[in-house]
């Protein structure tokens, strides 16, 4: 049998925009994991911020997606992008549950979150998560900013096709040794979906957990015995500002809304 690796070995394939995008996403989650770890989330008994581990897990998933795409295992990469989508929804959902159920006097440990951290509680299905985000007082204003019933729903179906092997084409996309039309188009699809996932997650981060992305100036000054500059607790870490500029600023109304609602100084 004639084996042709030319499609996945050619320069245009490996210079596709999706690979640079993944690297920038990894930079964001690596930075977020570092700056968020010292924040103790309400409603849990963990040492350190459990969310920092989620962010590093997302970082690792992105690295795996990049490796699969480079090897031409595109369908497997889409399966992991579907997992990435779920990870983002789970992280947002846990934030909302903590926000709504935590109470200093009567409910210092939020049962659902605490049991999930102990692997004793299952996260509800996507439909339930989206209903919670839609109806929660902490997210109901941000929720309509995204196409949950349009482009996001369509792309989850697209990803499900690769999870469940609903078409023969999805099988062929995992075979780098055959010539296949539309291979680079699928890299574009991956890029579009990753951009959408990133837009959603960063928007919720700025809306609900802005301090997680605080610049290190405040703690750096304390570490060396200096008085921190006034207001520096509201300064954004450079990685967060870069992510805002790339993934949110192009969406003018959304960016303006987040600037108004976020407690951090966004340029």
Image (cartoon, rainbow, N blue to C red):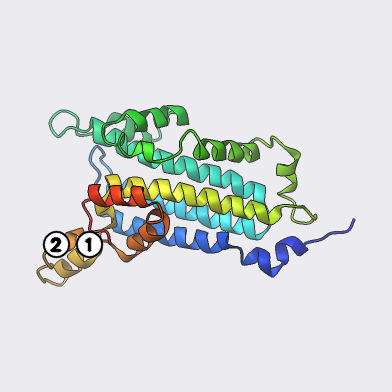
Q: Position of residue 32 (x, y in %)?
A: 35, 56
Question: In front here: 13 or 79?
Answer: 13
What residue is drawn where x is 77% and y is 52%?
Answer: 180
Disc ID at residue 231: 2
Residue at 19% in and 64% down: 219
Q: Does 64 sit left or right of 141 as displayed?
A: right
Where residue 266 sits, quadrant-wise, is bottom left
Crowding at dot 2, Cα within 10 Å, few <14 / some 14-19 / many 20+, comes out as few
Left or right for 90, reference 20: left
Q: Position of residue 12 (x, y in %)?
A: 67, 67
In what quadrant of the picture does the C terminus appear? bottom left
Residue 174 visible in the shown view: yes
Quick one: 55 or 201, which is closer to the camera?
201
- Residue 125 visible, this angle: no
In the picture shown, does residue 127 fall above or below 5?
above
Query: Residue 36's quadrant in the figure?
Result: bottom left
Question: Which mark is drawn over residue 164?
Answer: none
- Which residue does the image show at 72% across and 37% down from the upper left? 167
* Residue 95 % position (x, y): 31, 39
- Residue 175 located left or right of residue 40: right
Query: Which x, y percent locates residue 80?
Result: 56, 46
Contact (CB < 8 A) between labels 1 and 2? Answer: yes
Residue at the disc numbered 1: 235
Q: Element at badge 2?
A: loop
Task: Please name whichever residue, 212 or 259, is drawn nearer the observer in this view of the structure.
Answer: 259
Location of the N terminus (image quadrant)? bottom right
Indicate whether 109 appears above or below 31.
above
């Amino acid at each position: 049998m004639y084996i042709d690796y030319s499609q996945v070995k050619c320069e245009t394939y490996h210079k596709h925009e999706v690979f640079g995008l993944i690297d920038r996403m990894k930079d964001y989650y690596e930075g977020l994991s570092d700056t968020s770890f010292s924040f103790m989330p309400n409603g849990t008994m963990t040492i350190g911020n459990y969310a920092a581990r989620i962010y590093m897990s997302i970082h690792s998933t992105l690295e795996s997606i990049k490796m699969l795409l480079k090897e031409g295992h595109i369908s497997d990469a889409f399966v992991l992008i579907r997992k990435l989508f779920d990870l983002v929804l789970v992280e947002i959902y846990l934030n909302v549950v903590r926000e709504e159920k935590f109470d200093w006097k009567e409910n210092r440990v939020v049962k659902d979150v605490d049991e999930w951290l102990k692997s004793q509680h299952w996260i509800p299905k996507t439909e339930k998560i989206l209903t919670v985000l839609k109806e929660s007082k902490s997210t109901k204003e941000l929720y309509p900013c995204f196409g949950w019933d349009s482009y996001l729903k369509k792309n989850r179906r697209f990803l499900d096709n690769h999870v469940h092997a609903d078409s023969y084409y999805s099988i062929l996309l995992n075979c780098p040794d055959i010539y296949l039309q539309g291979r680079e188009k699928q890299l574009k699809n991956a890029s579009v979906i990753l951009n959408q996932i990133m837009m959603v997650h960063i928007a919720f981060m700025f809306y609900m957990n802005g301090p997680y992305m605080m610049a290190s100036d405040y703690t750096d000054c304390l570490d060396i015995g200096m008085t921190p500059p006034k207001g520096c607790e509201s300064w954004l870490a450079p990685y967060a500002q870069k992510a805002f500029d790339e993934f949110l600023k192009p969406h003018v109304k959304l960016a303006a809304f987040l600037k108004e609602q976020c407690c951090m100084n966004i340029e």
